[in-house]
Image: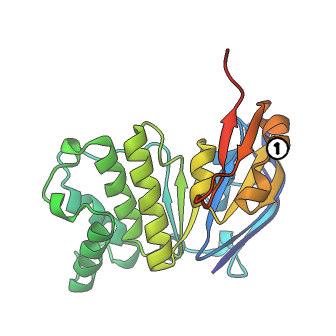
């Protein structure tokens, strides 16, 4: 499965946030979108998943125009976890994850045996099966994030879009979430497209990175080719060194001393 976007222009009101954006996404890859605050990262994500209309350009999913998909048809191909999400506090984990099956159901039917099987699989894959009877309100931040990822996973999409999935999590739960994302990608083949602020995490888990600056694509490629001293200065205005350590697959970013 592929998503091809060409010449996208997206904005809010009279303000153009993203312009002349080309991006190509593939099932089986982890693609991370990075860039400074306000550069248009989340806006691109919304346009690629039809949460936001684009003014110019085109988006094709498997060579079919995104605008021509029925809502349920699109939800079977693309799963989206936005930055902010909420559920009624009395919802149980298993009930929330069950909402991921809605694209496959008629309004008058409940979960089938196949639905229940997939819901259990999604909870087990994300490590939340043992808390399935727990209310979502009782879950910690890290647990809650895994439950929401399980809900998207229950859709069985080809590509999963995650908008800043580690926001508001402590470092332990951030790493746990990144490990989960990589595990799901490697074991199930699901494509992942993420917006991240932590560049070290992007280096660790990504197959490709897209850098956005001032609403336009600055660069795209393999993590070690994209995250360079030059890019860090020109995009983030930060001085650093990219350090390779023996035994590590990805380099570290050593920032200039604060004082």
Looking at the picture, how far across and down is residue 7, in whole percent? 85, 60
**Looking at this view, is 247 or 218 the one in front?**
247
Q: For the residue labelled by badge 1, is the local secondary structure a helix, a strand or a loop?
A: helix
Residue 79 left/right relative to 230: left
Looking at the picture, how far across and down is residue 144, in whole percent? 31, 49
User: Which residue is situated farthest in the top direction here?
Assistant: 259
According to the picture, the residue beneath numbered tag 1 turns out to be 231
Asked if 48 appears above or below 26 in the picture, the reply is above
Looking at the picture, how far across and down is residue 168, in whole percent? 43, 36
Callout count: 1
> Coloured how?
rainbow
Query: Is any atom of residue 21 visible in this view?
Result: yes
Kindly identify the residue that appears in the image at 34 percent across and 55 percent down: 146
Query: Is any atom of residue 55 visible in this view?
Result: no
User: Which residue is situated farthest in the front direction here?
Assistant: 246
Kindly identify the residue that appears in the image at 44 percent across and 46 percent down: 174
Residue 22 left/right relative to 256: right
Q: Determine crowd level at label 1: few under 14, some 14-19, many 20+ residues with C-alpha closer than 10 A.
A: some
Looking at the picture, how far across and down is residue 188, in whole percent? 45, 78
User: Which residue is situated farthest in the bottom direction here?
Assistant: 114
**Looking at this view, is 204 or 251 the one in front?**
251
For residue 171, what is the image quadrant?
Answer: top left
Kindly identify the residue that appears in the image at 78 percent across and 31 percent down: 239
| Quarter in which the C terminus is drawn | top right
Residue 181 left/right relative to 112: right
| Quarter in which the N terminus is drawn | bottom right
Asked if 164 appears above or below 223 in the picture, the reply is above
Residue 154 left/right relative to 54: left
Asked if 168 appears above or below 126 in the picture, the reply is above
């Amino acid at each position: 499965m592929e998503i091809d976007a060409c010449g996208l222009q997206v904005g809010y009101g009279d303000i153009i946030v993203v312009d002349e954006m080309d991006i190509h996404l593939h099932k089986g890859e982890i693609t991370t979108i990075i860039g400074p605050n306000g550069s248009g990262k989340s806006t691109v994500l919304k346009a690629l998943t039809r949460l936001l209309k684009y003014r110019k350009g085109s988006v094709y999913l498997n060579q079919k125009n995104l605008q021509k998909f029925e809502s349920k048809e699109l939800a079977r191909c693309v799963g989206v976890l936005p930055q902010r999400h909420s559920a009624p506090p009395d919802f149980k984990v298993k009930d929330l994850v069950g909402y991921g099956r809605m694209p496959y159901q008629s309004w008058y039917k409940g979960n089938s045996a196949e639905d229940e099987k997939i819901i259990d699989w999604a909870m087990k894959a994300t490590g939340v099966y043992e808390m399935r009877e727990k209310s979502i309100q009782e879950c910690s931040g890290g647990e809650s994030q895994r439950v929401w990822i399980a809900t998207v996973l229950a859709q069985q999409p080809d590509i999963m879009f995650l908008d800043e999935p580690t926001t508001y999590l402590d470092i332990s739960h951030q790493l746990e979430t990144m490990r989960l994302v990589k595990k799901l990608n490697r074991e199930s083949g699901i494509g992942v497209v993420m917006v991240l602020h932590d560049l070290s995490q992007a280096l660790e888990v990504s197959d490709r990175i897209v850098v956005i600056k001032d609403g336009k694509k600055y660069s795209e490629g393999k993590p070690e080719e994209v995250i360079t001293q030059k890019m860090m200065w020109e995009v983030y205005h930060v001085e650093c060194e990219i350090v390779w350590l023996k035994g590590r697959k990805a380099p570290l970013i050593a920032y200039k001393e604060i004082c």
